[in-house]
Amino acid sequence: MRQTNYFAAVAFIVILGVGGGVAFFLYSSGRTESMGIAAMSLIIALLAASSIQVADQWDRAVVLRLGRFRALQGPGLFFIIPVIDVIPYWIDTRVITASFNAEKTLTKDTVPVDVDAVLFWKVLDPKKAALDVADYRSAISWASQTALRDVIGKTMLSNMLEGREQISKELQKIIDERTEPWGVNVLSVEIKDVRIPPSLEDAMSMQAQAERERQARVILGDSERQVAEKFGDAAKTYIDNPIALHLRAMNMLYEGLKQNSTIVIVPSTAVESMQLGSMAGLAALSMGISEEMAAKGKTDKKVQETLAAPAGKTAPA
């Protein structure tokens, strides 16, 4: 949006004030030229205010003289001929951002999606932007939307969700080719969001969950295979070394009994294969470990009662 030209307004006020002061002085002197001078000062102030123009550092003014292109003016102070010269466009040469989207657009695999994107562009040739296209901002917006729809229609949904950077580069190339004749350079295009239907989103979530479960089962199966291989290697070692097998069996039995267990069921075939001796010996071993653990528990309880008794008293034996 073009701002108010304060310099022209100041010039208008100064010229009109000077002319009005002179006219008032002549009117006080009784001279009849006062009205003419006042009217002339008003006309000169209007012409001066119309001819004085100031362009900001980032603005370029397109000046037409009697309908024909004359020059690009700015930045800074410049003058035009009122009535003969007109300024139809003030072109902003800074980097400009514009949001655009494509709603309910089908991908290559016929999935409707909504895509939001941001365009960064800049006017390099203000003359082409003013003379070669009626409304360059609107033209850029429509060119961006049509390019986005074309790219979506040629892309699979999976590629769109995973390869946003590649889609952005392709969009930038297409839009830049379309806007180059208008003196516009597209700096970059960024895909902000890709929205899919809720039903498809739930289906994709279920698919991802099933894929994770499949991977977990594969990992578990591979772990069991590795454990089985290690067991096979251990079995080969125990075949050649029965003493190691016997010690391992005793250790397993001890580990099972020390966890406050009083009954351990061991198949007779396992007893024979692990060379643990007769069933009577195994039972005696179990009872011995249980008695040892019970005695240890009583000792710990007596120690706790002694520590908890009041000072000067001893716990009953």
Image (tube, grey):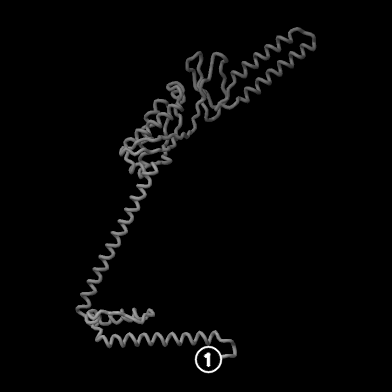
Q: Residue furthest right?
A: 29
* Residue nearest the observer in this picture, 278 or 152: 278
* Residue nearest the observer in this picture, 142 or 296: 296
* Residue nearest the observer in this picture, 29 or 165: 165
Q: Is residue 100 above or below residue 297?
A: above
> Residue flagged by tag 1: what amino acid is it?
Pro
Is 33 displayed left or right of 316 in the figure?
right
Quadrant in the rendering for residue 287: bottom left
Q: What residue do we see at 62% from left, 19% from top?
A: 49
Q: Residue furthest bottom?
A: 317
Where's the N terminus, which quadrant?
top right
Q: Is residue 194 above or below residue 84?
A: below
* Residue 153 place in picture, x, y as percent: 33, 35
Q: Which residue is mark 1?
A: 316
Q: What residue do we see at 39% from left, 41% from top?
A: 197
Q: What residue do we see at 37% from left, 30% from top?
A: 177
* Residue 228 place in picture, x, y as percent: 25, 68
Quadrant in the rendering for residue 117: top left
* Residue nearest the observer in this picture, 230 or 306: 306
Q: Residues within 10 Å of mark 1 (few under 14, many from 20)?
A: few
Is 277 displayed left or right of 55 in the figure?
left
Is 49 displayed left or right of 131 in the figure?
right
